Image (cartoon, grey):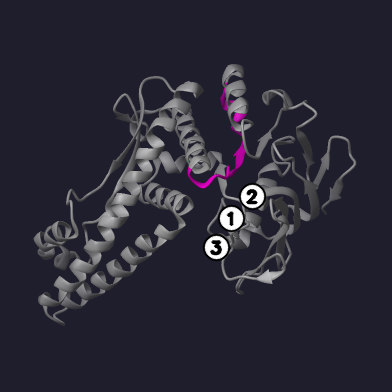
Amino acid sequence: MIVTRLSLRDFRTYDRVQVPLGPGLTVVHGRNGAGKTNLLEGLYFGCTARSCRTSNEREVLRFDATAARVEVEGCDRDGDHTLAVGFQPGEDKRIKVDGVPVARLLDASVRPLVSVFLPERLELVKGPPALRRSHLDAVITALWPSRTANRTGYRQALAQRNALLTRLKHGRGSRDALAAWDLELARHAIALRDDRSRAIDLLQQPFAEVAGELGLAGVPELRYRPRSQATSAAGFAAELGERIDSDLERGFTGHGPHRDDLALLRDGRELRVYGSQGEQRLGLLALLLAERDVLTAERGATPLLLLDDVMSELDAGRRGLLVARITRAGQSLVTTTDLAHVPGAEDASVVRLLVTPGRVETDDARTRADAA
């Protein structure tokens, strides 16, 4: 689906706003603090029913507002579509697709895939492994939706095994009961590990190519680091068996895909440890663009790309390369404090949105919306 219009009500700094998006590149410009990132977040919220900036979604409410609403209008080969998300703290989100209530927006076939770069997402590179695992699993879900069951099954089996370990630690139950859960956990663990490994194999070459284009010196590499080296479920179950005593002492399972990691490297060294912040930004951007290329090839649809404040960190040559890449196919939204930082921003095909506090308008002022 190509997004054609975004509507926000009581979202962050916006009272009511309705803005158009271009089928290719949309550039959102304005001074720092004007609300550019809030607009980008609203678009992400309308496409996924969750925030890309905070886990405390009360923060998306405009000050003194009691509820927020986001609508995303778009079209695909089957016609026009509308995604609507209503949020009120303490209540379930009210989500509709083409006017029909749904439980989860992520399951809607018409919604666009979305990839987002935010400066704070650098934690994906330099933060704990759990963030990278979660991100990789989200990529797998986008690539192969049916394989979400592998991750869900693993989580459920892991929770059951951990509950049993807790009971055993307190002298309730028999160790023999672990064998059945070891086999169940192993079956899902091998499937999940193989999904992650396959995804990294697909991303490896595009990541290296994009990182090189953007100026990340040396040899860029993605490396999946699984805890288990087992080649079968039986082998993984045997590994769990060897660790029963330590698991009982801790009261939880210490071995498996929930402890795996994804490393971004340059010349064999982790960007997390040895990269500068600029190099980490390039690595993250290269990863997101590589994922976009792979998703385009695998799903036949290019994800909507949201880039927040990325141009200021690149020189003029790299900005040109980035714009050429993101406008090759699909739809993109880029925020910037200076239009001159986005090569081609003045082209007639580009939609330009000027953001001032509480206000968004197109450059020709034909579409305008106010927010108190």
Element at label 1:
loop
Q: Please state which of the two labelled residues, at mark 1 or mark 3, is closer to the viewer.
A: 3
Q: Residue at position x 56%, y 41% from top? A: 118
Gap in Å between the C-alphas at discs 1 and 2?
A: 6 Å
Residue 41 got which mark?
2
Q: Is residue 151 visible?
A: yes
Q: Residue at position x 48%, y 27% from top? A: 210
Q: Nearer the viewer, residue 6 or 149?
A: 149
Amino acid on which disc 3 is placed: Asp
Asked whether the beta carbons under mark 1 and mark 3 sit within 8 Å of each other, the answer is no
Q: Which of marks 3 and 2 is nearer the N terminus?
A: 2
Amino acid on which disc 1 is placed: Ser
Residue 107 got which mark?
3
Q: Residue at position x 46%, y 57% from top? A: 145
Q: Name above or below for residue 172 compared with residue 56.
A: below
**Which x, y percent locates residue 308?**
61, 38
The region drawn magenta spans: 298-314
Give the side of residue 318 with respect to residue 164, left or right.
right
Asked whether the beta carbons under mark 1 and mark 2 sit within 8 Å of each other, the answer is yes
Q: Residue at position x 34%, y 66% from top? A: 153
Q: Is residue 62 visible?
A: no
